[in-house]
Image (cartoon, helix red, strand yellow):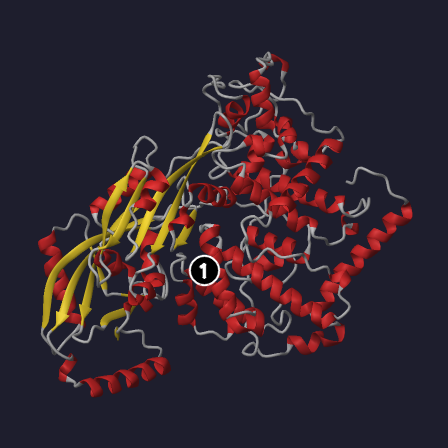
């Protein structure tokens, strides 16, 4: 609620404006009126595929939510003392909803976000489209259609992927398919190829299928729904968070956006010492609080309107959701920088840290009738030491939310047959339509039992190759290497066996072979046959990485050892350099490591080469604390040969995947571009935007 008191006429004006904006958006959707209902029901299903309805879980135990959000008494800015932290469930009532203090801190967070929102240069962050300011209904509809599509694609890409990586992918995607209609007309293979490197390829398939549904649907006609519940129910791959993001950012509706960053921020704001990954009651409580907060923000902008229906659409909900996520990814990170947080006044955890530093007396359990059962016990209090006040509080905040032990990954092994023709083409096959990496093309593979020895793997590989290629001699070149690949739930070890064909397949000449291939491709398109085929450029196939990591040398033990050393704070090694092993070819090798940081690494660069550096950078937040981040350097010396330069965009992708945990990637042609102060500035802007599970 706004702090000031408005006149009744102002309140009525806000109410009417809100109704007009909401009505305007609903009209744009082209919903059929009553006179069309019968005609629409009789349309054959072949013309409009019915949307897939998915079950949405509704919380049926609102008791905890009611206790956190109901009652006439406002939340009190009082804090318990660790390690006993004696408190009731009501202690977790959000101070961000508490009267004047809550209103002031909500505005502080929005003002902070407005001041930093452009720092990371995310191209999908754009001004809100106010439907009340657009007179042309058709122009408004097209603008909302484009905006909803842009936000949708960005949110799906950002799942499990760092912001710095997504920016380039998003820009290329939008350049190729600027509208949802363009995407709906795209070939499935092209969509998967554009997604290459982002992982979780089923996301690309679902996006493509959903785009076709939205475009073909007689009601949507290319415009994604505005209501979060409808988005979640009708659009494949859109869950509760993504639905809220589209609804709030694009349409200005008061919908919560709760991702991993927001779960962490709100667990600290509420002082909940529990898991936000495995404890459903905690997650449900945070979602309920997030919903109440975004509604309060919407009310803040509506000039005193009291009823939910009186809340106008505005840029408030979208800014608020993005502000919480930005705070979680740059300030309230797993290792928080509490000194930079704009809303410590409402943070229970921050208040607890302050109170512990003052050595305040703890409450007695006997004074409390309803001790909290939501929080996990805390085994020790705050460790004072000699650090600054803010550093001690930040260290305490790291305990919230509680850490969850990771499940052991399932391990599987497979034999990969890299079968090459004399012309350099490789045999590839398409994976099954369902399951891991569904529908992607790969070098032929076959599963093998864990622990199978190399000799037996060789026999199995030769048997598999003989089944795949008949009528021509196949020479087995041996096992060229084993490539481990870690998915979210699986560690897959790929044992790569190289084969070379002695001649053309089935004795065909080159011209006849090419004609045959063209005929086969036409037949495959007509029949949907997904059998093996030959590809002259495995770089164009989405699963080529099983061979490329091995053949490039990036799986070498010395590279992985040096990489782990740079990432280890206890090891003095803080940079490594990878170079090409020969003037031609793509094989890479570790050529240098050092302890002297960015300047020493820059001095080791070769002006006649393309090289890849990885460096640990430490910089101070204050007199007592430092941050550790990692940068990937792509060096293109001025005297590098043209052909080597031309392949950087392709071959650097393998390096980025091998040295995966980095906050920024810097392409440099001059050592002046590798000034450590400039790198620190860029790392500060990138903030905590590493979602790969690393420290940078």
Q: Quadrant of the N terminus?
A: top right
Residue 381: x %, y % from top left: 49, 18
Q: Is residue 135 visible?
A: yes
Left or right, residue 35 beside residue 377? right
Residue 277: x %, y % from top left: 47, 39
Circle 1: element type? helix
- Picture layout, residue 437 above or below residue 370: below
Name the residue rendered at 42%, 63% in the picture. 195
Name the residue rendered at 48%, 20% in the picture. 387
- Picture layout, residue 175 above or below residue 629: below
- Picture layout, residue 384 above or below residue 629: above
Q: Tag 1: Cα neighbours inside 10 Å, few (<14), some, or many (≥20)?
A: some
Query: Which residue position holds label 1?
Result: 203
Front residue of 587/368: it is 587
Front residue of 362/173: it is 173
Q: Is residue 407 visible?
A: no
Q: How many labels does the image show?
A: 1
Name the residue rendered at 57%, 25% in the picture. 372
Front residue of 665/469: it is 665
Front residue of 60/612: it is 612
Residue 16: x %, y % from top left: 84, 56
Q: In which quarter of the image is the C terminus?
A: top left
Residue 595: x %, y % from top left: 30, 36
Please tell me in which quadrant of the rendered image residue 148 appears.
bottom right
């Amino acid at each position: 609620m706004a702090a000031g008191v408005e006149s009744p006429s102002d309140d009525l004006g806000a109410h009417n404006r809100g109704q007009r904006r909401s009505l305007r958006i609903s009209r744009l959707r082209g919903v059929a009126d009553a006179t069309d209902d019968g005609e629409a029901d009789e349309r054959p299903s072949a013309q409009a595929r019915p949307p897939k309805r998915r079950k949405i879980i509704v919380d049926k135990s609102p008791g905890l939510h009611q206790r956190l959000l109901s009652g006439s008494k406002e939340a009190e800015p009082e804090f318990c003392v660790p390690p006993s932290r004696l408190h009731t469930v009501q202690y977790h009532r959000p101070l961000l909803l508490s009267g004047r203090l809550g209103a002031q801190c909500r505005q502080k967070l929005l003002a902070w976000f407005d001041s930093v929102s452009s720092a990371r240069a995310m191209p999908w962050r754009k001004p809100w489209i106010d439907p009340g300011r657009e007179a042309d209904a058709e122009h408004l509809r097209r603008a909302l259609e484009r905006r909803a599509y842009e936000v949708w694609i960005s949110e799906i890409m950002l799942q499990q992927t760092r912001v710095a990586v997504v920016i380039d992918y998003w820009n290329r995607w939008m350049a190729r398919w600027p509208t949802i209609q363009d995407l709906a007309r795209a070939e499935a293979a092209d969509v998967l190829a554009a997604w290459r490197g982002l992982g979780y390829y089923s996301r690309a398939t679902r996006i493509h299928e959903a785009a076709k549904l939205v475009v073909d649907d007689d009601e949507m006609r290319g415009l994604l729904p505005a209501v979060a519940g409808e988005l979640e129910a009708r659009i494949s791959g859109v869950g509760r968070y993504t639905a809220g993001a589209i609804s709030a950012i694009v349409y200005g509706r008061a919908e919560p956006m709760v991702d991993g960053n927001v779960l962490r921020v709100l667990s600290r704001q509420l002082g909940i010492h529990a898991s936000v990954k495995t404890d459903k009651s905690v997650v449900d409580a945070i979602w309920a609080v997030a919903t109440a907060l975004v509604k309060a923000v919407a009310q803040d902008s509506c000039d005193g309107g009291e009823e939910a229906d009186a809340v106008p659409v505005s840029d408030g909900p979208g800014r608020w959701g993005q502000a919480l996520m930005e705070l979680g990814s740059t300030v309230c990170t797993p290792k928080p920088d509490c000194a930079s947080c704009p809303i410590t006044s409402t943070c229970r955890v921050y208040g607890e840290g302050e109170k512990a530093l003052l050595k305040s007396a703890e409450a007695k359990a006997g004074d409390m009738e309803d001790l909290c059962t939501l929080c996990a016990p805390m085994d020790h209090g705050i460790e004072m030491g000699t650090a600054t006040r803010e550093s001690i509080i930040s260290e305490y905040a790291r305990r919230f939310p509680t850490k969850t032990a990771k499940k052991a990954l399932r391990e599987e092994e497979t034999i990969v047959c890299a079968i090459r023709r004399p012309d350099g083409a490789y045999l590839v096959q398409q994976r099954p339509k369902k399951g891991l990496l569904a529908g992607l093309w790969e070098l032929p593979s076959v599963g093998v039992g864990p622990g199978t020895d190399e000799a037996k793997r060789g026999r199995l590989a030769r048997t598999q190759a003989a089944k795949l290629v008949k009528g021509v001699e196949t020479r087995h070149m041996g096992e060229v290497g084993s490539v481990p690949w870690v998915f979210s739930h699986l560690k897959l070890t790929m044992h790569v066996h190289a084969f070379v064909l002695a001649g053309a397949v089935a004795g065909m000449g080159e011209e006849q072979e090419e004609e045959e291939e063209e005929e086969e491709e036409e037949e495959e398109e007509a029949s949907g046959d997904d059998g093996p085929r030959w590809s002259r450029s495995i770089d164009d196939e989405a699963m080529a990485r099983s061979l490329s990591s091995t053949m490039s040398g990036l799986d070498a033990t010395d590279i992985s050892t040096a990489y782990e050393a740079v990432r280890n704070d206890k090891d003095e090694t803080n940079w490594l350099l990878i170079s090409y092993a020969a003037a031609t070819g793509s094989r890479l090798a570790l050529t240098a490591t050092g302890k002297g940081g960015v300047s020493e690494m820059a001095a080791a660069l070769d002006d006649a080469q393309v090289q890849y550096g990885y460096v640990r950078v430490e910089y101070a937040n204050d007199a007592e604390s430092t941050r550790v981040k990692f940068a990937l350097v792509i060096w293109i010396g001025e005297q590098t040969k043209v052909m080597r330069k031309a392949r950087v965009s392709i071959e650097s992708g393998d390096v980025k995947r091998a040295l995966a945990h980095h906050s920024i990637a810097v392409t440099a042609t001059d050592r002046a571009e590798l000034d450590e102060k400039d790198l620190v500035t860029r790392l500060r802007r990138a903030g905590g935007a590493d979602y790969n599970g690393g420290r940078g």
